[in-house]
């Protein structure tokens, strides 16, 4: 009886096959500026065996991350089970890879899109300096968080905060923040400057946890 029972157990519990495993990671996980491309890739394997020639879909949903994930792009795994995607997004995105034939999917990753900045300055009378930060965004965005401006002497490795200003909409997807500061006489008109923008609640642009530094590093 024991032999029969043992034989039955061996037939009922054969070796379990390894399930397919699908990964996805962003090579641009720190985020990109508006208008730039996000790059992502991953592998499809079963145990230690790469699964080649399999269709993989990149699916995503934009901020505010509601509703169903939609298919954005497709790729085919190579001989090593690897695949890559390169896509441009207007807002922050939640992304996952899906292998439909194997009914498996990756974990969700978040792709951050930041406003595209550009800064200029204009020298004014009385050792004053007007610094302007321009920001490009998708249409319909509202930026509310104040930009931070930094100023230091020539050849400085860092600069301290000297002003902040709220961005003002000047066109479709265009903002600018302006601050006027005074240069110390000892600098003899030579300086280095920088600017930093912060996350605007409800904009869906950038990492909400990011912060402007107390000192700007050159």
Image: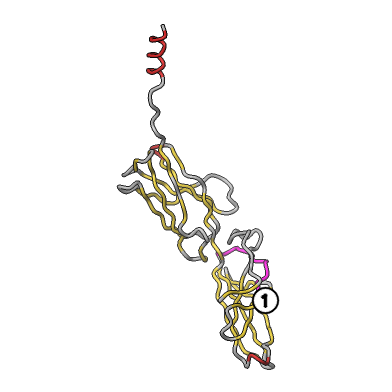
Residue drawn 62% across and 69% down? 197
Quadrant (top left/top right/bottom left/bottom right) for the N terminus: top left
Residue drawn 65% across and 78% down? 178
Q: Is residue 141 magenta?
A: yes
5 with respect to 155 (left or right): left
Q: Is residue 32 above or below residue 151?
A: above
Task: Give percent across and percent down for residue 158.
Answer: 60, 77
In the displayed orientation, state which residue is furthest to the front.
Answer: 2
Magenta span: chief secondary structure: loop
Q: Which quarter of the picture shows residue 172? A: bottom right
Q: Is residue 180 above or below residue 62?
A: below
Task: Give percent across and percent down for residue 2.
Answer: 42, 9
152 with respect to 36 (left or right): right
Return the residue nearer the eye: 114 or 210.
210
Task: Give percent across and percent down for residue 38.
Answer: 46, 59
Q: Is residue 194 above or below residue 5?
A: below
Residue drawn 41% across and 16% down? 9
Return the residue nearer the eye: 210 or 36.
210
Q: Is residue 138 above or below residue 162?
A: above
Residues shaded magenta: 138-148
Look at the image and name its color scheme: secondary structure
Quadrant (top left/top right/bottom left/bottom right) for the C terminus: bottom right
Task: Give percent across and percent down for residue 24.
Answer: 45, 49
Residue drawn 69% across and 78% down? 162
Residue placed under numbered mark 1 in the picture: 161
In the displayed orientation, state which residue is furthest to the top.
Answer: 1
Label 1: state its secondary structure.
Answer: strand
Q: Give the class, few, some or many, for how many residues have Cα within 10 Å of label 1's Cα (few <14, many ≥20).
A: some
């Amino acid at each position: 009886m024991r032999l029969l029972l043992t034989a039955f157990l061996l037939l009922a519990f054969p070796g379990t096959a390894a399930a397919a495993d699908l990964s996805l990671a962003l090579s641009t996980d720190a985020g990109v500026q508006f208008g730039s491309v996000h790059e992502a890739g991953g592998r499809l394997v079963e145990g230690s065996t790469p699964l080649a020639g399999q269709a993989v879909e990149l699916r995503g949903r934009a901020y505010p991350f509601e509703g169903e994930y939609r298919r954005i792009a497709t790729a085919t795994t190579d001989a090593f089970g690897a695949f890559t995607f390169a896509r441009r997004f207007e807002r922050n995105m939640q992304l996952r890879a899906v292998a439909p034939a194997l009914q498996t999917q990756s974990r969700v990753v978040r792709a951050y899109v930041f406003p595209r900045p550009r800064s200029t300055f204009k020298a004014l009378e009385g050792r004053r300096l007007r610094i302007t930060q321009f920001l490009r965004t998708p249409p319909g965005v509202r930026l509310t968080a104040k930009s931070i401006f930094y100023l230091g002497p020539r050849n400085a490795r860092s600069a301290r905060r000297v002003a902040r200003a709220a961005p003002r909409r000047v066109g479709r997807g265009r903002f600018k923040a302006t601050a006027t500061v005074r240069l110390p006489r000892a600098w003899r008109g030579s300086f280095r400057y920088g600017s930093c923008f912060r996350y605007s609640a409800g904009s869906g642009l950038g990492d909400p946890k990011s912060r402007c530094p107390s000192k700007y590093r050159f």
